[in-house]
Image (cartoon, helix red, strand yellow):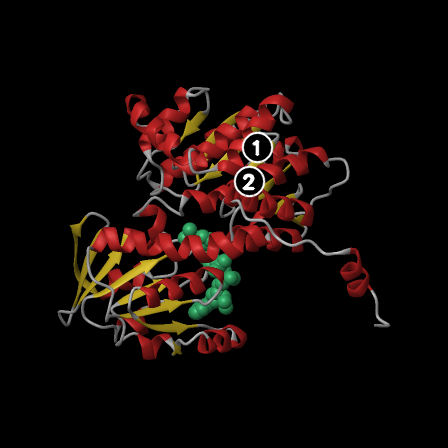
Amino acid sequence: MESMIRDIHLAPQGQLKLDWVAAHMPLLNQIKNNYEKELPFRGKKVVICLHLEAKTGYLGQVIKAGGADVCMVASNPLSTQDDVVAALVDSGIQVHAWYNATDEEYKMHLHRGLDFHPDLVIDDGGDLVSTLHKERPQQLTEIIGGCEETTTGILRLRAMEKDGTLNFPMVAVNDAFCKYLFDNRYGTGQSVWDGINRTTNLVVAGKTVVVAGYGWCGKGVAMRAKGLGARVIVTEVDPIKVIEAIMDGFTVLTMEEAAPLGDFFITVTGNVDVIRKEHLAVIKDQAILANAGHFDVEVSKKDLSALAVSKLRVRNNIEEYVLKDGRKIYLLAEGRLVNLAAGDGHPAEIMDMTFALQALSLQYIFEHRDELSPHVYEVPREIDQKVAAMKLHTLGVKIDNLTEQQKKYLAGWEN
Ligand SMILES: NC(=O)c1ccc[n+]([C@@H]2O[C@H](COP(=O)([O-])OP(=O)(O)OC[C@H]3O[C@@H](n4cnc5c(N)ncnc54)[C@H](O)[C@@H]3O)[C@@H](O)[C@H]2O)c1
């Protein structure tokens, strides 16, 4: 099938972006070299549904180097980079995606990906896998298994597993140590601020930043806000995370208390309606709202529209809502994840670890297909350890090893 992209003539520009990230992703380079020799996915069809930018594009090329036929579709309508997908098509990968797809186009692209009849899938957020189960049940038996990238997608997979709907094994890549400790925390922490800063061109020092959700992503966003000189308020629903936030030095308030105080609000909960009408009723004039959670449901756009008398695009990726009492509220990137919809996503070196996990986990699921059943699996500990060891090697860091005596001491109880 023909690819469906915006403009193939953008390929040279996209190729430069791919070359740049490849130069900063040594783990993927090493895996690609091995794959070119071993061809672990020879003859298999892989559909990859991720934010389509340079780093994910390079992952697609690595899987292709392993002998697979690869098709890529977008996991979000606002994060596709048209030049990168043009370069991917030029390199022999089928792509169905373009920047700013409508909801109908986004769905159509997912379906065109499924028309590729994958044997293996990589998903981010669960839209591909849930469309397969809901709308393509006849294809379910064709699927060997796949990998899921993010927290929200894993929640959806576990819900499917619980009610007995999940039809093939999936590896929860997000839950590997080498994923959430670095990608969710340091990746989101840096790239969210990169997205907000380049979009707003405003100062953060001395302002009040409200971070909703103190999970792995929220910790990173709050930590970097503090580093930029902001006063940071956290909102949470989990008492344990609240204690953690307090001990990390942050003020914890309810969203209702925080709403009149914040200059920047960043939702990163994976939940719905975290900022809604009762908060918007008291929110500070000129507040800037951004979301970093997977779906554009954390700031209620319905409530924002209902309270507004006018809405205007005042800058690329900034919508100004004027409320009845004259307060102005600014929503970034239509409430979609700001680091990807209004930025380039996480740094390449961080995604290098995440995508090394993706490639090795996909290989694992393929090679262990006869032992696995339709469940959500953890990334095997050996793969997590291997990625950590590869990373340390590229950093040139040596570490101590346990002596025989130390191993014995740790394994004993009579000492
Ligand atoms: N922007 C990105 O690049 C990026 C990267 C990784 C993950 N994500 C997405 O970010 C979201 C969060 O991921 P995570 O790994 O931090 O998850 P997590 O489960 O570690 O943290 C989420 C936190 O939000 C809290 N929470 C839930 N509802 C809340 C509410 N109403 N108010 C305040 N807090 C609430 C939870 O108690 C939890 O502590 C997910 O949707 C995930 O898919 C985005």
Residue 171, position as x, y percentages in the image: 63, 45
Three-letter amino acid code at the position of disc 2? Ala
Residue drawn at x 51%, y 50% as measured from the top left: 150
Is the distance from the Cβ of mark 1 to the nearest ligand 1 atom less than 8 Å?
no
27 lies above or below 201: above
Query: Residue 139 shows which numbered tag?
Result: none
Residue drawn at x 69%, y 44% as measured from the top left: 374
Residue placed under numbered mark 2 in the picture: 356
In the picture, measured across the screen, residue 250 lies left or right of residue 174, that is left
Residue 175, position as x, y percentages in the image: 58, 54
Residue drawn at x 73%, y 43% as measured from the top left: 373
Residue 361, position as x, y percentages in the image: 62, 40
Secondary structure beneath dot 1 equals helix
**Mark 1 burial class by Cα count in 10 Å: few <14, some 14-19, many 20+:** some
In the picture, measured across the screen, residue 236 lies left or right of residue 225, that is right
Query: Between residues 35 and 97, which one lies in front from this camera angle?
Result: 35
> What separation in Å lies between label 2 and label 1 (alpha carbons)?
7 Å
Query: Residue 31 shows which numbered tag?
Result: 1
Query: Between residues 57 and 369, which one lies in front from this camera angle?
Result: 57
Residue 119 placement: quadrant:
top right
